Image: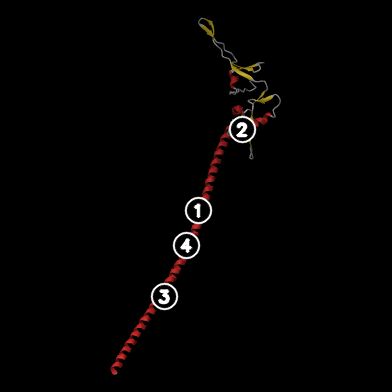
Amino acid sequence: MHGVLDDLQNRNSDIVHSLANQLTYVKKVADTTSLNTESIANLFSIVKDSIIQSHDKYQQITRDLFWFNLTFLGQSTTYAVVREMEFALLHLTQQLDEIFDAIQLAISGSLSMKLISPSSLQSILRNVTLHLPEGYELIAGTRTKDIHQYYKLSKLSIVANFHCIKLIIHITLKFVDHSFMPYKIIILPERISPDKFVKYAIAYPYLAIQVSQNGYIPFTEKDYSKCVTSSITVCPLDI
């Protein structure tokens, strides 16, 4: 009986010892689980902060990209405007150079196509013909094919002040049916003996015969040099 009791007591001690060990293990597991939980909570907090920081950085990068696009677009627009201004200034410089050249010609008394285009000149001349006195007409008419002759036959004067520049075009007029055809007299040698020739010297080597053949005007070499020769020859009245 005593042996059985001792055996039971020993078993009870083993069970108590085993339960104590199990409680110790459960306590250790609980401590480990608590530690792991704290670690997981701490890791979650770190991950959460990292996500928040990453989101903030993403928002900052998005704002930076937005402002970069705006800045780049603004620079592109500014560059385009600057290029347009450079082109406009170049075009203006070229126009000023052309006007300056035309004014230099005008100062010398020459009419230039850069200053007055043929179409504009034709319009001016047509208006002039409406105010001419009876019996007068323009030297070359107003047909389109004849307008170019006025750039050589006309003279130009400039009147200017601080506000404007006025051009005065001097255009030659003629009487109706008082046109002349100029001729140069060529003197051929004349034989006066088998071995001698003579050639007459004349004072008026040029002769302008009226188209209606009702008269003529003799010209000396000096007189004819005062005329402006082109497809139309214009001579001053004082010769």
Measure the alpha-carbon separation of dots 4 and 2.
Answer: 68 Å
Residue placed under numbered mark 1 in the picture = 72
Q: Given contact means CB atoms under 8 Å apart, are the residues at marks 4 and 3 in contact? A: no
Q: From the viewer's side, name the closer residue of 145 and 135.
A: 145
Residue placed under numbered mark 2 in the picture = 119
Give how far across and how far down residue 82 sits, in percent: 53, 47
**Which label sits in the foreground, 1 or 3?**
3
Q: From the viewer's side, name the closer residue of 23 and 47.
A: 23
User: Residue drawn 51% across and 52% down?
Assistant: 73
Badge 2 density bin: few <14, some 14–19, many ≥20, Cα 10 Å: few
Outermost residue to the left: 3
Q: Secondary structure at mark 3?
A: helix
**Which label sits in the foreground, 4 or 2?**
4
Amino acid type, residue under disc 1 in the picture? Phe
Give how far across and how far down residue 7 sits, in percent: 29, 91
Residue placed under numbered mark 3 in the picture = 37
Give how far across and how far down residue 105 sits, in percent: 57, 32
> Does residue 185 sit above or below 148 in this rendering?
above
Q: Mark 2 vs mark 1: which is more N-terminal? A: 1
Q: Secondary structure at mark 4?
A: helix
Q: Is residue 21 left or right of residue 130?
A: left
